[in-house]
Amino acid sequence: MIVVAKTDPNQGAKGISLIVVETADEPGFAASGAILDKIGQKSADTSELFFQDCRVPAGNRLGESEGEGFIQLMKQLPQERLNVAAGALAAMEAGASDVTLDYVRERKAFGQRVLDFQNTRFKLAENRSAHCPDVRRSVRALAHGRQARCRHGLHGETVGQ
């Protein structure tokens, strides 16, 4: 696992390093085992980690020198934002469209499926054409801009730089 560690408290952001901790056989490392309840990203397990006199070799530090951790993290922030946006788009489409469609197929009113009402079909088509393309265009523009910056070696720069 990669741990973000404060290696020099007097240096602020420049006192942060990324360190690889090989958890399988590392003395002084323990996980609580209890999965923490959280609001988002339910598929990614989160639990408390404990480091008591945990020692790792200096060679496990990521980067050329100590204190580069904050910069390393910030360089990945645009990619993380893109990943979150793409995940949100997928969740929105699956949640809003698929669940709604399943519901109107199963739900009956006045002796017929809700899907069979003309107004329901109008509303489904309106929702699909009016809202989703705006969000899709925004996410695609973000993704294409990010990909172009990566092709030109501008990995850590944000939009507009």
Image (tube, rainbow, N blue to C red):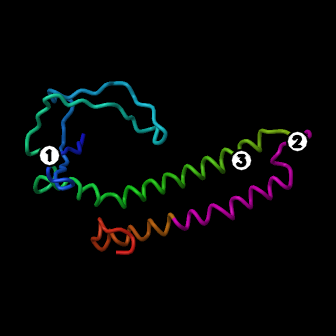
Q: Nearer the viewer, mark 1 or mark 3?
A: 1
- At label 2, the amino acid type is Gln
* Mark 3 burial class by Cα count in 10 Å: few <14, some 14-19, many 20+: some
First of labels 1, 3 by sequence position: 1
SS state under label 1:
loop
Quarter of the image for residue 129 reads bottom right
Disc 1 to disc 3, C-alpha distance: 53 Å
Q: Dominant secondary structure of the magenta stretch?
A: helix
Q: Is residue 14 magenta?
A: no
Q: Amino acid at mark 1?
A: Thr
Q: Is residue 137 magenta?
A: yes
Q: Amino acid at mark 3?
A: Leu
Q: Where 119 sits versus 4, above or below?
A: below
- Residue 93 in the image, given as x and y percentages of width and height: 60, 52
x%, y% of residue 33?
33, 24
Tell whether 41 sits left or right of 29.
Answer: right
Question: Is 110 on the left or on the right of 122, as rendered?
Answer: right
Task: Measure the C-alpha gap from mark 3 to mark 2.
Answer: 15 Å
Is disc 2 placed on a helix, strand or loop? strand
Residue 112's mark? 2
Residue name at image x 30 percent, y 74 percent: 152
Crowding at mark 1 (Cα within 10 Å: few <14, some 14-19, many 20+): some
Which of label 2 and label 1 is nearer to you?
1
Give the numbered dot on residue 7. Answer: 1
Among the two numbered marks 2 and 1 on one chain, the one whose residue lies closer to the N terminus: 1
**Range drawn in magenta:** 110-138
Where is mark 3, residue-wise?
A: 101
Quadrant showing the N terminus: top left
